[in-house]
Amino acid sequence: MECTVFNPFEDRFSRDMRNALSSALASAIETGVDTPLLALIEDYRSRDLAPHYQNYFQDRWDRFTKALTSIQPDQEPIAQAVILWNHGLFFEVHEVLEHVWYHTLGNEKLVLQALIRAAGVYVKQEYGYTATASKIAGKSWPVLKENAQLLTPYFNPGPLILALQHLDKKPPKL
């Protein structure tokens, strides 16, 4: 059966496309070198993709372009993640923060994990996985609340904590 909607949880090509694009974006942000990302973009542009893949690709490329105009390689990863978040790039927030999370300790590591989970809440909700989103939110907001002081240099965590507590469908701007 052929897939007619973009869904990375049920369609392998959707998952591969999402993962490849987000990984290339994270690499471009981390290194400041966008050549691999641009090569991947050209590869997808050259393909005869079904409309739902084309729509996802174009939407992501538009969001990437806007986010990249604001992100600087020397910014702290949470600041970069806030920009991605505010462009609705929740899976990409996960990609950027996960690389930092591996090398972080203590409460900072817990906060990064909670932000990754918070982004995951909105990824899951987008595809209708409300029960899973609720479980993830329940693990995320208490850590964010307990460590809010670590986030205040980047954004006011209060609206995010409330949105996660109430499982708001619309993510707050950070």
Image (cartoon, helix red, strand yellow):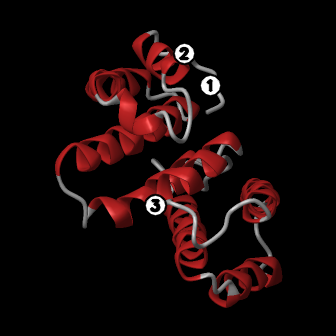
Give yes or no for contact between labels 1 and 3 (Cβ–Cβ under 8 Å). Answer: no
Q: Nearer the viewer, mark 1 or mark 3?
A: 1
Q: CA distance from mark 1 to mark 2?
A: 9 Å
Callout 3 amino acid: Glu
Q: Are marks 1 and 2 in contact (CB under 8 Å)?
A: yes
Q: Residue at x 34, y 22 (%)?
A: 145
Q: Earlier in the sequence, mark 1 or mark 3?
A: 3
Where in the figure is residue 17, as x and y percent of width and height?
58, 67
Q: Is residue 134 above or below residue 59?
A: above
What residue is at 59 percent from the left and 45 percent from the top? 82
Q: Can I make out residue 1 in this image?
A: no
Indicate the amino acid at tag 1. Pro
Q: How far across and down, in percent of the image, does residue 143 sit?
A: 27, 29
Residue that carries the numbered disc 1 in the rendered image: 172
Position above or below: 20 against 8: below
Q: Is residue 44 left or right of residue 109?
A: right
According to the picture, the residue beneath numbered tag 3 turns out to be 95
